[in-house]
Image (cartoon, helix red, strand yellow):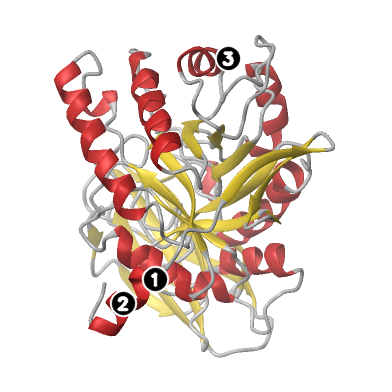
């Protein structure tokens, strides 16, 4: 119950089967009770009566085994059904690898056209999600229900929080074993006040923050929220908050810069708050196209782990993995770094170079690629098409030093490099450039 806000006065917070044998075993599984408690002023989750701090990632189902291998105890799914798997399959695999699941109930977003003034549509959504809760509420891998994802992003109708509370109240009635939360894009005073007023049955908030994560505690204080929280997404500096070129192309961190920032941000914002923080889910334990094919995923399109996974291994286990990915120290095009707004002439030769530290002196392979700058730009993680790759523009390739011929057409482009060791671990970087 979100009554631990500055403006309020009371606190309330408790509130794929292939055989008959597998079916029988599944029917005998019992839920494991999860509670939100406050002890000696500190909030914590209790799972089966034992303190449980979330160490996890938002993940693709096929990456669950490597997530567990690197030290996680939990994973997050955004919805109970996707085009790749069902919640049953996700929960079962998580259970197999001793991971819990924060399971998303996919409430529709106003920014994608859903109208929370439409009582019939809201009721239909409620009935559907109630059915999903009934399906999965007793699974022993279930940890927390996540009611919607970034419903506060580009919205105007606060009735969305009425719908969230209706679902939270329903869950309290039919599933006393699992708390509820909603995932916010950042945290602002207006949203907190509306949720406090309209969602008395919600147990706590979850916050999603990227480059600004070291300022998390200050942002929470500004919002007036005084309750517990999960950091349900965090990771690379967001494309909306990074430096840009003179033609407004965002500058992506190299894999080394991401790895270093992950460690710093985790220490500064998540590990440092033992009073309110219930744990976190790094984003994204997989690969996706969002501004670039490498921006947010901890894996490459070839399914290979990057430097950032080594950083998470270090965060979660306290030691570096035995074999480390190559460290990409820097990359230059025509002698310049990406933040220098590199403008080149069309159909001319230019050189590029990447500087690497190879921890184990592994054999390395280098892959270079030139893409057009992405123009299919989504919001809030919405689907984006991969930009076009341009062939025959790399004219000389000496691994860490190449020569390119710039495209004939004026416009914005990016030069990418992927350096892979013999254990299939990868370092990545890209440089935006503009052809005139």
Q: x and y percent of residue 266 in the render? A: 69, 50
Circle 1: element type: loop
Q: Examine the image and state in which quarter residue 218 appears.
A: top right
Residue depth check, mark 3 versus mark 2: number of the one nearer the observer: 2
**N-terminal label among 3 and 2:** 2
Determine which residue is flagged by label 3. Answer: 189
Q: Position of residue 21 (x, y in %)?
A: 29, 84
Location of residue 120 in the rendering, given as x and y in whole percent from the top left corner: 14, 21
Task: Name the residue beneath numbered marker 2.
Answer: 24
Q: Report if the CB atoms under discs 1 and 3 are less than 8 Å apart.
A: no
Viewer-side residue, 241 vs 187 = 187
Is residue 225 shown left or right of residue 407? right
Q: At 46% from the left edge and 75% from the top edge, which residue is drawn?
A: 96
| Label 2 close to label 1 by CB (< 8 Å) | yes
Of residues 398 and 108, the one drawn nearer to the viewer in this rendering: 108
Kindly tell me whether residue 424 is visible in this rendering. yes
Vertical placement of 145 versus 117: above or below? below
* Extreme residue in the left direction: 120
Mark 3 lies on a secondary structure that is: helix
- Examine the rendered structure and indicate whether residue 423 appears above or below residue 393: below
Whole-number angstrom distance, CA of label 2 to CA of label 1: 6 Å
Q: In this figure, which residue is indicated by the disc labeled 1?
A: 28
Report crowding for label 2: few under 14, some 14 to 19, many 20 or more residues within 10 A (C-alpha): few
* Closer mark to the observer between disc 1 and disc 3: 1
Q: Residue at x 23, y 81 (%)?
A: 18
Distance from disc 3 to disc 2, alpha carbons, whole Å, reads: 49 Å
Q: Is residue 254 above or below residue 148?
A: below
Between the C-alphas of marks 1 and 3, the distance is: 45 Å
Drawn side of residue 403 relative to residue 384, left or right: right
Within-10-Å neighbours for mark 3: few <14, some 14–19, many 20+ = some
Residue placed most toward the observer, 100 or 57: 100
Work out which quarter of the rendered image holds the N terminus and state it. Answer: top right
């Amino acid at each position: 119950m979100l009554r631990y806000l500055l403006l309020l006065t009371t606190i309330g917070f408790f509130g794929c089967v292939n055989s008959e044998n597998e079916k029988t075993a599944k029917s005998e599984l019992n839920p494991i009770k999860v509670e939100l408690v406050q002890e000696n002023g500190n909030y914590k989750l209790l799972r089966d009566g034992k303190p449980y701090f979330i160490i996890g990632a938002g993940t693709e189902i096929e990456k669950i085994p490597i997530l567990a291998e690197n030290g996680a105890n939990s994973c997050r799914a955004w919805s109970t059904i996707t085009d790749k798997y069902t919640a049953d399959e996700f929960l079962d695999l998580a259970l197999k690898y001793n991971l819990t699941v924060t399971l998303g109930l996919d409430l529709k977003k106003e920014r994608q056209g859903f109208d929370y003034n439409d009582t019939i549509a809201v009721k239909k959504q409620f009935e559907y999600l109630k059915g999903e809760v009934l399906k999965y509420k007793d699974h022993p891998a279930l940890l927390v229900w996540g009611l919607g994802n970034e419903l506060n992003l580009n919205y105007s109708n606060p009735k969305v929080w009425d719908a969230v509370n209706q679902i939270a109240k329903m869950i309290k009635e039919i599933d006393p074993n699992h708390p509820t939360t909603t995932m916010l894009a950042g945290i602002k005073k207006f949203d907190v006040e509306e949720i406090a007023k309209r969602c008395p049955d919600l147990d706590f908030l979850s916050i999603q923050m990227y480059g600004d994560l070291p300022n998390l505690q200050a942002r929470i204080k500004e919002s007036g929220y005084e309750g517990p929280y999960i950091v349900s997404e965090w990771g690379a500096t967001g494309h909306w908050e990074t430096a840009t070129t003179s033609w407004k192309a965002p500058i992506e961190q190299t894999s080394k810069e991401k790895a270093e920032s992950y460690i710093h941000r985790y220490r500064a914002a998540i590990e440092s708050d033992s009073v309110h923080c219930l744990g976190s889910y790094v984003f994204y334990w997989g690969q996706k196209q969002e501004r670039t094919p490498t921006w947010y995923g901890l894996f490459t399109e070839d399914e290979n782990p990057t430097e950032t996974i080594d950083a998470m291994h270090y965060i979660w286990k306290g030691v570096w993995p035995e074999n480390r990915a190559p460290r990409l120290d820097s990359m230059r095009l025509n002698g310049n770094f990406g933040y220098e707004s590199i403008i080149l002439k069309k159909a001319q030769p230019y050189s590029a170079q990447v500087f690497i530290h190879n921890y184990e002196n592994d054999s390395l392979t280098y892959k270079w690629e030139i893409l057009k700058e992405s123009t299919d730009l989504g919001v809030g993680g919405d689907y984006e098409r991969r930009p076009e790759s341009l062939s025959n523009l790399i004219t000389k390739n000496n691994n860490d030093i190449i020569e390119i011929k710039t495209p004939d057409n004026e416009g914005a482009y990016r030069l990418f490099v992927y350096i892979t060791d013999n254990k299939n671990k990868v370092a990545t970087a890209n440089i935006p450039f503009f052809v005139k």
